[in-house]
Image (spheres, coloured by chain):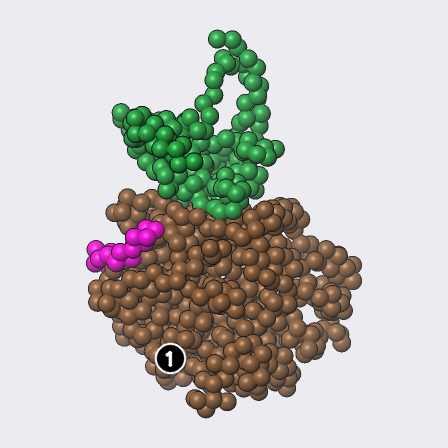
Amino acid sequence: MSKVKKKVKVIKIDLDKCNGCRACEVICSAFHAKPKYSSNNPARSRIRLVRDPIRDVYLPVYAGEYAKAECAGRDKYVIDGKEYSECDFCRASCPSRDAFKEPDSGLPLKCDMCEDDPAQEKPLCVQWCLNDALTYEEEEVEVEEEAKPEDVEIGLESMVDKYGLQKVMDTVARMAKKD
Amino acid sequence: MRYAETGYNLEIDLSRGNIERVQTDPKLTELHLGGLGTNAKVLWDRVPPETEPFSSDNLLIFSTGLLGGTPAPGANRTVVTTYSPQTLLMGYSMMGGFWAPELKYAGYDKIIFRGKSPNLVYVWINNDKVEIRDASHLRGKGAVETAELIRKELKEPNAQVAAIGLAGENRVYTASIEQGRSSASRLGIGAVMGDKGIKAIVVRGTKDINLARPAEYLELCNEVLNYIKLRNSNPVPNVMTILQGLGSPQEMLHTDEKWHTENFMWGNARVRKKDYWNKEVEEKWKATQETVRTRLISCYNCPMKCGAIISVPGLSTYMMKCFSKLTYTMAAFADLDFGFRIAQRATEYGVDGFSTPQIMAFAFELKEAGILTDADFAGCPTDSEGKFFWLLDRIVRREGIGDVLANGTYWAAKQIGKGAEEYAHNNIKKHEQLPLKLGMLNPVYFLMYATGEKINITQIEGQFPQAPFMTMEERQEFIKDWTQVPDEKFKQIVLDWEPRGERSNPYYPTVDMSVDIVDWQEKMHYIDDALGVCAGLSSFPLKPPYHIHNYPKFISSATGMDMDEAGLTQVYKRNRTLIRAINVRRGLRRADEKPPEDHWKKRFPELEEKLLDAYYKFKGWNREGIPTKETLHELGMDYISEDFEQRGII
């Protein structure tokens, strides 16, 4: 595979600056609503704040790749005396939890850095974080070229995992006939 | 489709265990918006004025505001409404936090409780699934502790919990409802919740809130955020530190307490310590605060950081905001360290940090005066800190003298007699006020104190400066970017207002100007409370991001309703008048509209009468403060005048 130069969008997360307000969840879910901003619902957000004020846990996490199986074990981290589950840091939409899934359909969600139409100068979660817990940077890195699966493909893959390929194909065929 | 609101209330009858999801009338949204406005309408329609606060016929209403949970920054308030056991009037107390948006995401605008549960219960609302669950294992547990236990029990770390502590269970009149960093503390609503047998209300919601004209709405939200940024980097000059910024007074951030400790009263709102603040105290208090304060935190969807996580070594962690770090400290003539320690216990008990310390200081004054006796305090430690912890326990458990004091200074003094009434000196409408005693009567503040229906000055004041600026340069500086004024005339008042001489307090601002100023400030609070937007970004601070000019656009783009400044003013008048009508029906009259005798040293009885006359006239109320038939007709509330006529009120 050939190497290519690529601009990587980086959201820098400073846990110490987070005031726990969840504005990031609000604006993310609003931006990705269809039509844009027509609704908001943190349960649809592609960023989640793991928040436990009494233990002073404030951890914004972004939705990453879809994973069809949950991890074999569950590790725990203790950082500065605070205990975190490794799931707290995990970006995957996976069967073990309801985070990063559409609440109605269960379809996986993934952060797209607000590259949706129209592409935003900075991801909106960063723009709405007035406390600078989230800041935006760009880095140039060399990566191996890869085919990027599209949203539809990721969605279909999760449906296939859930219902089996045959059922999904039958359903798509039936829907195609209806039109 | 309903926009911004869900269009559904949850009706829960605790006596029968009945739960219903009821569609609401969109017409009421047009007339009253939501939140406090529609709560008042429900209370007027459904709870007769003869109803005792601790009657199963009394309603306890938890409401979101019309904009609550939408992307509008700071639209997170919960408005709780019932008849208050403390004042016997309509009680509405509010809290920020995360609860109201969660309720809306679950699909409801309000929860309306009626009846009483025979056993202690908690209510678990998970979208469409609503259960009344046994809470006997939570009896006596702290409010913060209860929230933690329920989240664990349900395995729902993201559920939002509003809970009472032991004080609410025991119907202590200063019982609060605690919810994360926020609490609805005033007017005894926690006691009504306890009376109904509700330990906690737990909510989890994962549904959408819809907007009518989304692009327009988001642009308004972005303007507000940009203005907050601008204001945060440009504090208002020439006013004291806590008035310079947005949010509630930044008491968790600031450690300089010279102003409060030297200008507010210590003990039972009596003793002023003019030279208290020195280098030694400053360093000690700063160290205390920085040791216990883990993080500055906010409410839902708000960039401000008005609250803090407080971890006192050896005690369980709790959250605090605003002025409560000083209320216990100053009532007990103690140190800040004591304030943080006792507030931990008080938060778990769930009591109002405003009234409770005054009740305790009042009791110790009565003991010193020989009105209460040693027998009343048998077992009480002698050190100033120990005795406050001891008395707090007695009050919350309603043991011995604590049972009397648990009803607040007004009722306690009545029951104790022997001249105790003289010591309950800091009340308005039977409720304890800020421990503030001043020199010269300020006409604007006189009106706000006297006529406020919330009976809490912080829920009326804001927007207009508390005192005149010293020089003309300062005044010009202040008005140059004062875009929030509803009318240019307010700028002229600021320019002309002098610290001394002819155009100074109490005769300037003039009677008519004072009425105008108060009306503007009230208007903004009533709109906030109907929309569920925090006063800290709107009606409370100077030069806020929300104001009368952008609110109509927020409302119309969120809901699709037509709304302009005139229309919004009409809604405000309707809500203001409705709440007055509810209280009139419960007996409120002109004679009740009195700030404490000693609030100002220099009083002007004649002027004060004129101020009240002019205020009532402006509102369209009669000399007794009762809305007139014409006013009610103009606001489309003939049903109120009919009721008044039937009862012989007008």
Q: Of helix, strand and loop, which one carries label 1?
A: loop
Residue B434 visible in the displayed image: no
Q: Is residue B534 left or right of residue A121?
A: left
User: Which residue range is magenta in the image?
Assistant: B123-142
Residue B559 visible in the displayed image: yes
Between residues A133 and B47, which one lies in front from this camera angle?
B47
User: Chain A appears what colour?
Assistant: green
Chain letter of mark 1 equals B
Asked if residue B584 is positioned above or below residue B157 in the image, the reply reads below
Q: Residue at the bottom extreme? A: B648
Q: Which residue is mark 1?
A: B48
Q: What residue is rendered at 70% in x and 58% in y?
A: B482
Q: What residue is rendered at 32% in x and 53% in y?
A: B128
Position in image of residue B112 (x %, y %): 36, 65
Between residues B349 and B154, which one lies in front from this camera angle?
B154
Q: Which of the chains is brown? A: B
Between residues B108 and B68, which one lies in front from this camera angle?
B108
Position in image of residue A10 (x %, y %): 53, 27
Position in image of residue B453 (x %, y %): 50, 73
Q: Toward which corner of the image does residue B162 lie, by quadrant?
A: bottom left
